[in-house]
Amino acid sequence: MTTQAPPQPPATSPAPPPKPAPRGKYTGAEPNKLFWILLAAPGIIWLVILFVVPFYAVLAIGEGKLNTQTHAPVAVYNPFGWSSANLSNVLHDIFGAQAFVGPTVLTTIWYVAAASILSLLIAYPAAYFVARFAGRRKGLFLVLLVAPFWISYMMRMLAWIDLLQTNGYVNKVWSFIGLGSPNWLGGHSYTVILGLVYGYIPYLILVLYAGLDRIDPSLLEAGRDLGLSRVSTFWRVTLPLSRQPILTGMLITVLPMLGDFYTNQLLSGAPATAMIGNVIQGQLTTPFAAGQGAILSLIVLLVLIGPMIYYVVATNRTSQAAS
Amino acid sequence: MTGTLLKAKTSGPGTAGTRPRLFRNPWRHPWFLEGFTWLYLVWSLAPIVVAVLFSFNNGKSQSAFQGLSVRWYWGDKVNSIWYNPQLHSAIFQTLKLSALTTLIAVPVGVAFALGINKWRGKIPGGFNFLMILSFVVPELIFGVALYFIFTQMPGLRGVGLGTLAEVLGLVSWNLSWPAIIVQARLVTIGKQYEEASADLGCTHMQTLRRVMLPLLMPAIFASAILVFSGVIDDFVVVDLLSSNGSTQPMSVIIYSTVHGGNNGPALNALATVMLLMSFIVALLGFAGYRLMTRGQRIDNRQTLTAITGSD
């Protein structure tokens, strides 16, 4: 950067005064800024009304009051009138003596951690193989890796529900090996974790593939030429270079998993396996609790805002580096 | 300890220690990795094949195959997707939502991308950040917020739940696709084309219409494909914002029927229709993208990553 500084001053030094431009001629950004502002305006207005305002409304409802007759939440839009009743209720639910949200938070963390680590252990080798060794069959592998993208999430869950019935195909295999016929869909954490892995792994695999595919093969050849074995080339060149894709890939699977309520509802349905998403979704339609649901969803948002911003910054950086 | 172990290993095979590559081809095929990848692919796709097979089941079971039939498509006069009004309307609701959302989200998103790209400064940067943030916020949190404004907030309460709310919600949720993809494309196109067109005396509008939009067409098309198929697949936003059975698209019907515990092969048939729709969109997307980028150095693989948004 600094070495490039000297040649720059001439370029930025006063440019020849622009000739009086005829109508419509390109005159730099300033004079026609309005044109671009107008072009961006519909998107901005949409974003403000249907992205920013909704979150303010959630805050207003969460910090609002309860209609004592109908038990419907009443939003308070003026911050000076906010009450913290819901907030203290929610905090009580999470940390209090009879907390029911607290254990759910722990369940959620455990499921998401287990599912994302398992996903990484499965996705990385597969992505690594396709990116590095698939050769001429890369296209075929890529089509197969991408296929789940075009299959609805609900259908993918439905497929497993069919297979995991007590008299389904999985149990046919299971009892053939002599493992009996477990009731997979009877509210087990392992079923939920496997469901989460199955549901979100395609996203992770594609991010990893894209990252690994971008690694310059000559770097690996250099590693080999300098006497590293295949394994140590992987450890000392490939793995450090894939740290960024691993992080963004994990984020892109972890963020939706934390808002997931349908996977465990479909594959288990038991309250014992409920995740934070189930609590939010359940409170939403319960008259008393809608305000608490609002606060809870804001707390989740607050916890996730850091990782979300990290993701945005990281992907921006890679896209700038790529171009 | 490990150091000596490593040393012993590298100098192990006697005289060959100096040139181990003679004995082990450094680029030999990793059969273990390939086997693992195939296992993953079977695990990831075989259940879908089974689910599609069950949609042609002659019996009521989803766990035992009892012969081939199309009864769950149109044979059964009550429960097949052709005759069951709920399943039937779900297909059209999905198509309607996909079409409307694409028609609104793509123009708005593309215009946003173009405007933000040219309007320099801190303000557009902030809005752009907001746009990308809407891309990564968990869908449930976003859906809850939309649910509250459409049911509670004065001014927007009039929208209520139903098709209008679903479309508004889906557009907000999918707006970031065209915005992000077109911006990425603008960066790779660079400035020279616009500047040339401006030098030749084009107004902003003419440059936009005759130079920029044709150049951006593949990116716009890819984002339309992504939005359309994204809406087919969408569940959370439509689940929260649909009012009753008549405004529920396929994904919500599948979820609520399975959750209610009375799923049968007709549901598999519905899911298969959904699958078919997505695959048709994907194929159209692939073919269209190839057609638009012919003459450019773009191969099948790049096309594939473009229409899945993983570029």
Image: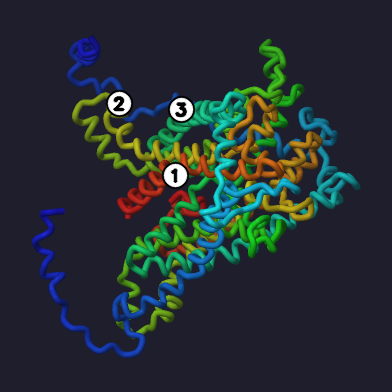
Image side of residue B126 versus residue A72, left or right: left
Alpha-carbon span between mark 2 and mark 1: 40 Å
Task: Return the residue nearer the eye: A102 or A275.
Answer: A102
When asked about the image quadrant of residue A28, the answer is bottom left
Q: Secondary structure at mark 1?
A: helix
- Residue drawn at (63%, 27%) of the image: A273
Q: Earlier in the sequence, mark 1 or mark 3?
A: 3
Q: Which residue is mark 1?
A: A305
In the displayed structure, B18 sits above or below B47; it is above
Kindly identify the amino acid type of the residue bearing the numbered disc 2: Arg
Tell me the quadrant of the picture where the N terminus of chain B can be found: top left
- Residue drawn at (75%, 48%) of the image: A70
- Residue drawn at (63%, 46%) of the image: B236
Q: Which residue is mark 2?
A: A230
Please say if the residues under marks 2 and 1 sit with CB atoms less than 8 Å apart.
no
Q: Which residue is mark 3?
A: A121
Please say if the residues under marks 1 and 3 sit with CB atoms less than 8 Å apart.
no
Query: What is the crowding at mark 1: few (fewer than 14 residues within 10 Å), some, or many (at least 20)?
Result: some
